[in-house]
Amino acid sequence: MNRASVFVQPCGLCGHSQPLLFSQDKRRQFWQCQHCHLVYVAQVHYLSAADEKAIYDQHENCLEDEGYRRFLSRAAVPVQEKVKLPATGLDFGCGPGPLLARMLTEYGYSMQCYDLYYANNVSVLDKYYDFITCTEVIEHIATPNQTLARLLSMLKPGAPLVLMTKLVLDAERFANWHYKNDLTHISFFSRATFDYIARHYDVGLEFIGNDVIVLTKYATSTDVR
């Protein structure tokens, strides 16, 4: 792919500009930052808040759906393995049906929920947590640097941030990837991107399976808010 000299929208993760054209389809172009490897779409392709929410409203994430529970268990199990009870967690981007928070409550954790559209209680963002979950959220965010910095600042030392998002493998597979076809997906991460994140924020990094990423705040970390 060739560099597009007229496209200088800074990367929403590291701030670098002049990315390389990574892929394109009939609706959007996808650019890759050459510093942190984030793949992202131009602002011109962002949906309005109303259009974005209309798509989310169509999601059928039934709280009693066993298939959905199995899907979310990929994020719940690492919490159980890494965080001892009693503990309080935040499900960031819980959506209209906060099943993961319910599951973790069933396991004995105390849970708070936040979602821009469905649980916009900003007071929960001013607390510290023993863990935070963020499943199928980060790919919807134009400025993941701001979101990651805030979430990591809310973790107690030694606490994990459990993310779930599908990972970019290469340009060839990206071109035929169903995940990029969702118009609410605007930021795409790879293992190289998370390597950058771990270095930049000085956190531990673990990949679990194909789509779960754990960023762990070091026990010696201190925050200045």
Image (cartoon, helix red, strand yellow):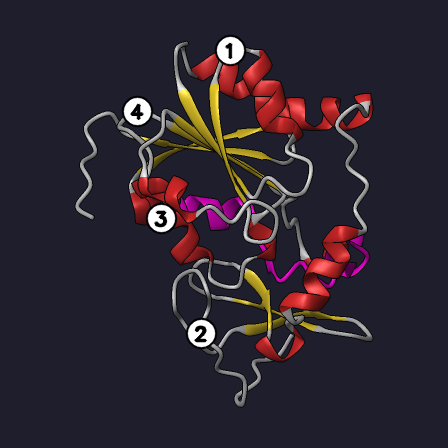
- CB under 8 Å between discs 4 and 3: no
Can you give x and y, in whole percent of width and height, for residue 89 in the image?
Answer: 44, 27
| Structural distance between the alpha carbons of marks 1 and 3 | 26 Å
Q: Tell me the amino acid under the disc marked 2.
A: Pro
Residue at the disc numbered 2: 10
Observer-side mark, 1 or 3, equals 1
Q: Earlier in the sequence, mark 1 or mark 2?
A: 2
| Structural distance between the alpha carbons of marks 2 and 3 | 20 Å
| Structural distance between the alpha carbons of marks 1 and 4 | 20 Å
- CB under 8 Å between discs 1 and 2: no
Observer-side mark, 2 or 4, equals 4
In the shown orientation, is residue 24 left or right of residue 162? right
Q: Earlier in the sequence, mark 2 or mark 4?
A: 2
Q: Earlier in the sequence, mark 4 or mark 3?
A: 3
For the N terminus, the image quarter is: bottom right
| Viewer-closest of 138 and 115 | 115
Q: Tell me the amino acid under the disc marked 1.
A: Gly
Residue at the disc numbered 4: 158
Q: Which mark is residue 108?
A: 1
